[in-house]
Image (cartoon, helix red, strand yellow):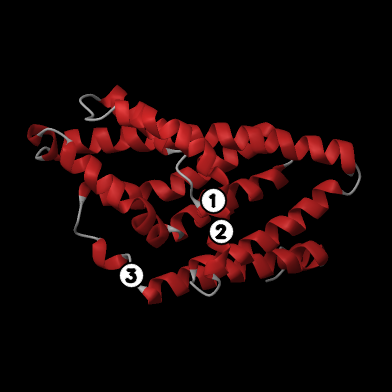
Amino acid sequence: MTIAFLIGLLSAIHCFGMCGGIVGALTMSLAPEIRTSNSRLFYYSLAYNLGRMASYAVAGLLAGWLGNTLITLLAPQHGLPLLRVFAALIVIFLGLYLGGWFPRLAIIERLGTPVWNKLQPLGQRLLPVKNPLQAFLFGVVWGWLPCGLVYYALLLALSEGSAYSAALFMVMFGLGTLIPMLLASMLAGRLNHLRNSVTIQRISGGLLIFMGIVSLILLYNPELLHSMHYMP
């Protein structure tokens, strides 16, 4: 589950670019007495993000059920190891995507467009947000916004082996994105310069590529991990 949290955290720049504008607009649309109170603004921001994470958990539950079904039907003996190799490759591809070395991978974001087209009008009806419950419900809708990063996380969740574990994986991923999204809410408009930081993008992408490669090495050489436990 640690890798789910790290992927979410390392995606901070992508989150600023993808959702920073939405968060800023939501923050500025709140009543002045809410925007000027850090405590009240924090609660509203947290409500948005808890709603978003709830949608991630539901999507993870569905992805885990699908992954478990595929393993049972197609490859009951070797399906899970194969999915874990697939997951390690996905982490590498995600690093290439976040680092800007393979922008064509963004094509995956188109997969959720039909669902978003149906949900977006529901989100519009919740605006302007006037209470934390409304903020939470808007976050639930926001969680289905087409996002390549979320879809890559869902592909990773497939390899968790159960619907419950996949849902927990997506919750941990959501927790990783929580810090950058809360910062985007509390400091609306003051972090825009980070969106185009090529250096940070490449560091984040490079770390994910490294994690994916290490995962592949350990999958094919599990004795390395065992031997590391006995290193002085």
Q: Tell me the residue that label 1 is attached to.
A: 110
Image x and y of residue 121, in percent: 37, 30
- The answer to which image quadrant residue 175 occupies is top left
Residue in the image at 21% along x and 30% along y? 128
- Name the residue type under label 1: Arg
Question: Is the Cβ of the residue at disc 1 closer than 8 Å to that at disc 3?
Answer: no
- Name the residue type under label 2: Ile
- Seen from the viewer's position, the closer of residues 38 and 49 is 49
- Seen from the viewer's position, the closer of residues 40 and 190 is 190
- Vertically, is 91 above or below 179? below
Residue 162 in sight: no
Image x and y of residue 230, in percent: 73, 66
Could you tell whether 120 is left or right of 6 in the image? left
Mark 2 crowdedness (10 Å alpha carbons): few <14, some 14-19, many ≥20:
few
- Vertically, is 74 above or below 96? above
Quadrant location of the C terminus in the rendered image: bottom right
Q: Tell me the residue that label 3 is attached to.
A: 196
- Vertically, is 206 above or below 140? below
Mark 1 crowdedness (10 Å alpha carbons): few <14, some 14-19, many ≥20:
few
- Vertically, is 125 above or below 16? above
Real-space CA distance between mark 1 and mark 2, rounded to the nearest whole angstrom: 6 Å
Could you tell whether 106 is left or right of 124 in the image? right
* Mark 1 or mark 3: whose residue is earlier in sequence: 1
- Name the residue type under label 3: Asn
* Mark 3 or mark 2: whose residue is earlier in sequence: 2
Real-space CA distance between mark 3 and mark 2, rounded to the nearest whole angstrom: 20 Å
- The answer to which image quadrant residue 48 occupies is top left
Question: Is the Cβ of the residue at disc 1 closer than 8 Å to that at disc 2?
Answer: yes
Q: Tell me the residue that label 2 is attached to.
A: 107
| Number of numbered discs overlaid on the protein picture | 3
